[in-house]
Image: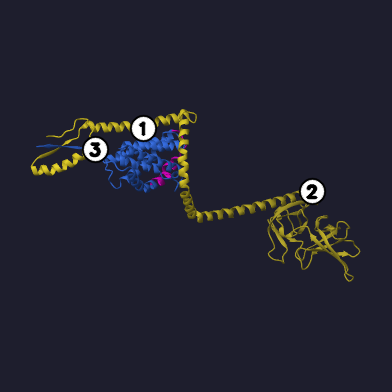
Amino acid sequence: MPVVPGAGDEIPLETWLHWLAMSRQRGARSAALGLTVRRVPTTIPSRNAGQLRRRLVVGLLVLASLVLISISFRSGETGPLSGVESAGATALRPFAVGLERVAQPFRDGYSWADGLLTAQSEAERLREENRELLQRAIQSEFALQENTYLRAQLNYIDSPRFPADFNPVVAEVTGRPAGAFTQAIVIAAGSSDGVRLNDPVVTADGLVGVVTRVTPSLARVQLLTDESAAASATDLRTDATGIVRHARGTRETLVLDRVRKEDVVRVKDEVVTAGWRAGALSSLFPKGIPIGKVTSVGQTDTDLFQQVQVDPYVDFGALDSVIVLVPTDRR
Amino acid sequence: MTATIWLRALAVAFVAAMLQVVIVSSIVVGGGAPDILLVTVVALGLLRGAIPGAVLGFVGGLVVDVSTLGTLGVTSLVLTLAGFWAGRYGETTRRARRLAPLLAVGSITLLAGVFGFILHYLLDEDVVARHALVTALAPAFVMNLILALPVHRLVRRVVGEELRAEPSAEVEVLV
């Protein structure tokens, strides 16, 4: 007798399993008994019902999603769903916090491990960044100093202290003495800028030296601290005259030599260039350029002149730029 | 599917959604983060069928949207379809195949990524295609594949597997 379920009937799973088991047993038995077993197709309506239900559910869910998207997107933060969403988020918040607390040790562990893995490259990057920042800081410091220095030079040029009948040629110092024996600098100005041999060189602080060699774009300046340099000078307060030159055995100390014993020179007196003129001859340096301050005065019975030490105003070891005094009549 | 199984499956989807929101989204490796909720929904679909897959995807997506205060329905829509497709794949293409979770997760990750991108684009949100479809999707794809088998195993342990006796044939005994 054929076993056929009614069309559209829902068949429990247990029944299906039972039938399947039975069909296998029947297969063996019917083969033994010579019975014919024939499989028949499933009833179409039950399959269609399953498909329909599936499509209905997913269609409803998609529709619900689209409705939610539409309402949520159109209404923004003030729409009807915002309250629901806010309440939902509030309700979910404890779960999130709890999970967060549970996960925090693992997250810390992950961060720690990740930090270990990336620490080396990170350290190298930070070192490189540090080097770069240090370079920038140094450059900024240099720029600041240079700015201050140049501003002082500019103020000096514009001030009444700047010698008349001279034009300034401001030049950057590009080279320095290689050893203790050569007290000279190389500046980035030459004959093309109007610089000539024996032009005096100053800064806003005072006398620097004299140009001893000129090329079209560069010039060498012999500093006042050089062994062979000398400049006629005078005590600004007492008019005592002498010759400023390098003090032997020291690096940046000057002496005011050839000051007669009867002239009065005192400590802290200011020494400036004398700027003499005798007929066609004249001093290389204009009158009144500051040189330094007297630090000591001494004399012995046997010496013909006083021994006057002068501390120069110019820091010869920190020259960044100088001003070459070019006579106006030459230009 | 009994009520107990439904409750378990809902709990699994809920936990996966919260994990995704709280923890997994922040694990960015190579520009992308894994999507454990998607992997879980795919596993649920494979194991329990298309309807549970779609429903659980919808619920999980809704939890994510609510928790992140995003546009409601966006993640729901993506995961509804993901769960449904996974379920259909399992129903029609022999879920017992060993590589079924990998194939399902891989293909659905790509499809969900593209679909999500299109959806956000249609919603006029600022989405960079290169980032969404290459930078973020490629690592997410790899990580989802890595998660696929363990998550599938775990989900199967919790919610079991639908015993499906295909009613494709009936037996008629002719005496």
Task: State the image coordinates of residue A129 (x, y, percent, origin top left).
Answer: 57, 53
Say which quadrant the N terminus of chain A sits in.
top left
Q: Amino acid under label 1?
A: Leu
Asked if marks 2 and 3 touch (Cβ < 8 Å), the reply is: no
Residue A294 lies left or right of residue B125; in this view the side is right
Among numbered discs 1 and 2, the one appearing first in the sequence: 1
Q: Is residue B27 above or below residue B64?
A: below
Q: Count residues near mark 1 (Cα–Cα under 10 Å), then give few for <14, some for 14-19, many for 20+.
A: many
> Which stretch is magenta?
B123-141
Mark 2 and mark 3 lie on one chain; the one further toward the N terminus is: 3
Q: Which residue is tagged 1?
A: A61
Q: Which mark is residue B2?
A: none
Q: Which mark is residue A13?
A: 3
The label shown at residue A159 is 2
Residue A122 percent coordinates (x, y): 52, 54
State which tag comes first along the sequence, 1 or 3: 3
Residue at image point 32% right, 36% down: B51
Label 1 and label 3 in one chain = yes
Residue B152 visible: yes
Name the front one of labels 1 and 2.
1
